[in-house]
Amino acid sequence: MDLIIRQATVAGAEQPADIGIRGERIARIGPAITETSPHEIDAAGRLVTPSLVETHVHLDAVLTAGSPRHNLTGSLFEGIEIWGERVKTLTREDVIRRADQAIRWMLACGVTHIRTHVDVCDPALVALRALLEVREAWRGVVEIQIVAFPQQGIYSFPDGEALMVQALDLGADLVGGIPHYEWTREYGERAVKTALRLAAERGLRADLHCDETDDDQSRFLEVVAAETIRLGLQGRVTAGHATAMHSYNNAYAHRLIRWMRQAGVHIVTNPLDNSVLQGRFDAYPIRRGFTRVKELLAAGINVCIGHDSIMDPWYPLGVGDPLQACFVMAHYGQMSGYEEVRALLEMVTTRAAACFGLDEYGLAEGRQADLVVWDAPTPEDAVRRIAPRVAVISRGRVVARTTPARSEVILRGTPEAVTFQP
Ligand SMILES: [Zn+2]
């Protein structure tokens, strides 16, 4: 074996298991592997899961908070204004430097797969070209999918459709969209139809920002579901945010969820950004403005958790850790039931992998060895403490390590360790 993880707690097993890795793959999972390896990790009962999959981030905008100025209100609209100024100064080097930095943070948090949107409302496609380089540079360690994202709309920006086609020709992996931001309902519908037609013609997946508003009249998800079914794209289409669903009447939401299930649409919810951006037009009571995660999960729809922004004009916080998003989701989505807390981790691992379209993923013999060793004994403890990732393994190699902090209290002059374990 090239690497053995000893005494790992793994989902579904009663007793700790050893995980043997040969080359890039998991060769064996069993109670006690008799072989040895020059590289062994003693998990000592710690949780081991498949690595984290980030399904929604904007690498072209990351780490720009405060440049050229800070967002004083924290609103979406001031954010858009500031980004409009910042985007004029984007250069290849600027995008690559910031994206590389953010990817390092995410990798240290256990992320080995990243789906990033990139703004293609730019005649020179500066950010897209830069991120195509970043994607190739990281190949083999972090797999990156690039969504051609028309931030200002396909039909509300000059030559938007041509730019989308050019972005795909250059090598973007997925078709994006933002129908609720287009100038009219008609433009929005056309944008959805164009995006999914391009995906079908080119054999690509699609991932659209969809109904990210508190407007209960924003109803493009139904168009996404209908077009997905019509074009036979079931399982290949993702809708991000879908926050208007919070405000739909229950009869409409019920009907919509049926179409979504038929279409096999994946939903990515982004609790960090949307918890601060939604409900901004409300007097008290202020809506959470959030998609119906529990109802969607109960209906058998795949829901994932995305990080979205990392220190950009829309969200000044974050370190690129999907577990912070899980933690906020537990509160904001009222997912504090025992099974619900455990399910949060699936929404950034196995569920996210299904959205990503990964078929080599998972903690099973023969699968690609992309793993995380947590400084936690259980999934619920990993979420509770946003536990450090002791080791991150990508394709069989340790690519990140974290030494957990040690806390102690000093009482009457005597130090005493505090582990935050009951
Ligand atoms: Zn987004």
Image (cartoon, helix red, strand yellow):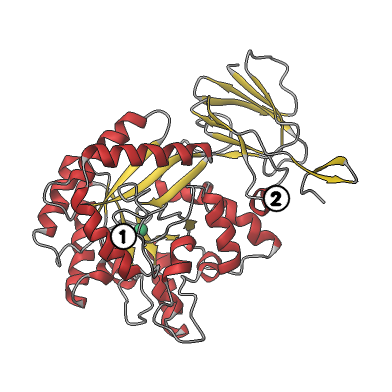
Q: Amino acid at mark 1?
A: Leu
Mark 1 Cβ and ligand 1 under 8 Å apart: no
Q: Considering only order in the chain, which callout, 2 or 1, is on the residue closer to the N terminus? A: 1
Residue in the image at 37% along x and 47% along y: 115
Residue in the image at 41% along x and 69% along y: 277
x and y percent of residue 401 in the render?
Answer: 58, 31
For this orientation, the residue located farthest to the right is 412
379 on left or right of 62: right
Give the crowd class for mark 2: few <14, some 14-19, many >=20 residues within 10 Å.
Answer: some
Decide which of 320, 182 is in the foreground and name it. 320
Figure quarter occupied by ligand 1: bottom left
Q: Which residue is mark 1?
A: 208
316 on left or right of 197: right
Residue in the image at 71% along x and 21% along y: 33
x and y percent of residue 223 in the render?
Answer: 28, 70
x and y percent of residue 138 in the render?
Answer: 36, 31
x and y percent of residue 416 in the render?
Answer: 85, 41
Q: Which residue is mark 2?
A: 381
Q: Is residue 23 visible?
A: yes
Relative to 397, residue 113 above or below: below
Relative to 294, residue 368 above or below: above
In the rendered picture of this protein, how many numbered marks are placed on residues?
A: 2
Which of the numbered marks, if any, corresponds to residue 290? Answer: none
Q: Which element is circle 2 on?
A: helix
Q: Amino acid at mark 2?
A: Asp
Q: Which element is circle 1 on?
A: strand
Decide which of 85, 270 is in the foreground and name it. 85
Decide which of 244, 85 is in the foreground and name it. 85
93 on left or right of 326: left
